[in-house]
Image: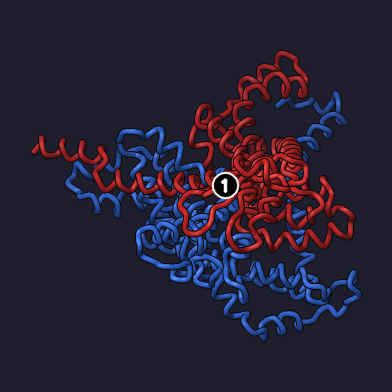
Amino acid sequence: MAIASPTRNRGHARWATWRRRAYVPVMLAPVVLTLGVLFFGSLLVALLQSFGHAPIYGITEFPTLKHYRSLFALPGFWASVGLTFYYAIVPTIVGTIASLYLALTLRRRFRGRRFVQFVYKLPLMIPYLVGVALTIVLFGNGGIAARTLFALGVIDSTGDFPRLIYSHAGWGVMFVYLWKQIPFTTLILYSVLMGLGKESEEAAVTLGAGRWQTFWHVTLPQIMPGVVSATIIVFAFNFGSFEVPFILGGGFPNTLPVEAWRAFDDADYSKRLRAMAIVMFIGVLSSAVLITYLAAYRRFERLRGRQ
Amino acid sequence: MIRQRRRGLGDRDRLGPFGRFYLTVVVGMVLGPFVPLVIGSFAFRWTWPDLLPSRWWWEARATARLPQGWDYVFSPISRVVESTGNTILIAILVTLLCAAISLPAARVLAKERFRGKSFVEFFLLTPLIVPEIAVGLGILVTFIQLGLAGTYWGIILVHLIPTIPYMVRVLTSVFQGLSDDYEEQARVLGASPLRTLWHVTLPMILPGLVAGGLFTFLISSNIFLLTFFIGGGRIETLPTLLFSRVSGGGALDAVAAGVALIVCIPGIVLLVITERFIKEEVFAKGFGG
């Protein structure tokens, strides 16, 4: 950049250095401030309230742990934690495996490739609630699946059809997650695969590696970073998802986000602090899982000698 | 030996019967559920155990006391038209605002090296990995105090949280692919920074900006939880309207099916546009590629 001569214009030079120094902070300021205030500000509000600082409800007992203590003692709370993990982890694992295979398949040559490439992305584009509606139509007690089984003579009444939705087993919840998330994970993995190209795999095959050997030792290690990012996003989403378990899950206990909303929505305002405690607990649990997962992945990469 | 190797490579590229079966299942799982949904939206009476409705909406049109099926969807009482308007208005404003505040940050992240850069990058990723509900309740409490709850600006502001990370990522990769030469030439030739931005930089990043904008629009129009919290029933968008239609438990009525189909429209339109004009990689920019 232009360097001003010090004898001619010292003020101008100082202005130029100031501008150079301020450039990065000023450019970053809009995004950092917006997210900082909205995102971290609200987390801070929730944190303070969960420890008993809520002047709007006339509660100023900060700092107290009683909202957490009452939460942990609540009947059904730990069952709720279990359900949250269950609904989050199972679809993440099943979905990742299904997506890996789908991404690898999409790379091959076959007829109708353009059509499949188009169709599989559809769930990615529409809200989870549409998936919920589809699940009710398909797997509800009087849904299409039950009607088809009736027509085939497998069941005699709606009562014979297994409860797939509105139950704690959560088949419906997990179906919606998979329906929405397999396309998401596949898209990430597919574009990572496209970025890599096929050279190293072809080299492995030329050197005599079998299908599985190539997959385990060449393809998978290369796309591992993509797998890790996708699973992190998917897990974090499922862990905090509200509307799907709220509608398709069983009654009480439900997942932590649903219980948080119920506590917040209660006519008794003091329960709102418990809602904040639940929400903080969700954040801490989810971060702990993700940090452990990332650390394990880093360790694995180091052990393998890749940095 | 050589022949065998060649065949090996060829075989790997062509899809086997199991792979074809898998793709059929995937396509079936994606499209299949829509068939009963579409049929359901036209049904008037569809009782157990009929596989097709026994009476259709247009047959019952004359006799039914209240508007049925799609008549109801498009009548003002269903609030579908109003919600669609809200969804589009909010999404457009979110997209414009999000682009305006993300552009400078993306440029700096793509072109400059500075201390704390990886921290800023991590900071911008956190909304993707911290559950939305953790943020939602804190914001709701704050917005109630500030009088922003139940207002358009309140909803627009919260929509920035999940959209900024995506927009910054897309725009950063756009700026990374941009050479400095043209801007420098414009400056050397005497163009002011503003003129350079308007006549040189913006036209060059326009395709990426459009791609990022389309995704922001889509994300915003699909957000449920934050709109539900901040809108508080006063401002309905398509996802919150659908929520109130499907959260009652039990089976799905024709109106709910109709609303669910309407909610899909922005996504389908966008899918068609992106398939035609935008390269796949934009979707997954920076996810470990």
x and y percentages locating residue A304 in the rendered image: 36, 59
Q: Where on the picture, by quarter, is residue A44?
A: bottom right
Q: How many marks?
A: 1
- Quadrant for the N terminus of chain A in the image: top right
Residue found farthest to the front? B63
For the colour red, the matching chain is: B
Left or right: A176 as drawn, with respect to B70: left
Q: Image point 53% across, 72% down: which residue?
A: A168
* In the foreground, B255 or A294: B255
Which residue is located at x 58 percent, y 34 percent? B270
Left-right relation of B18 to B38: left
The relative height of residue A232 versus residue B287 in the rendered view (above or below) is below
Query: Which chain did the image draw in blue?
Result: A
Relative vertical location of residue A180 with respect to residue B97 in this rendering, above or below: below
In the rendered view, does A184 fall on the left or right side of B116?
A: left
- Residue with the mark numbered 1: B43
Residue visible at 84% across and 26% down?
A7
At label 1, the amino acid type is: Ala
Please state the chain letter of the residue tagged with numbered disc 1 in the rendered image: B
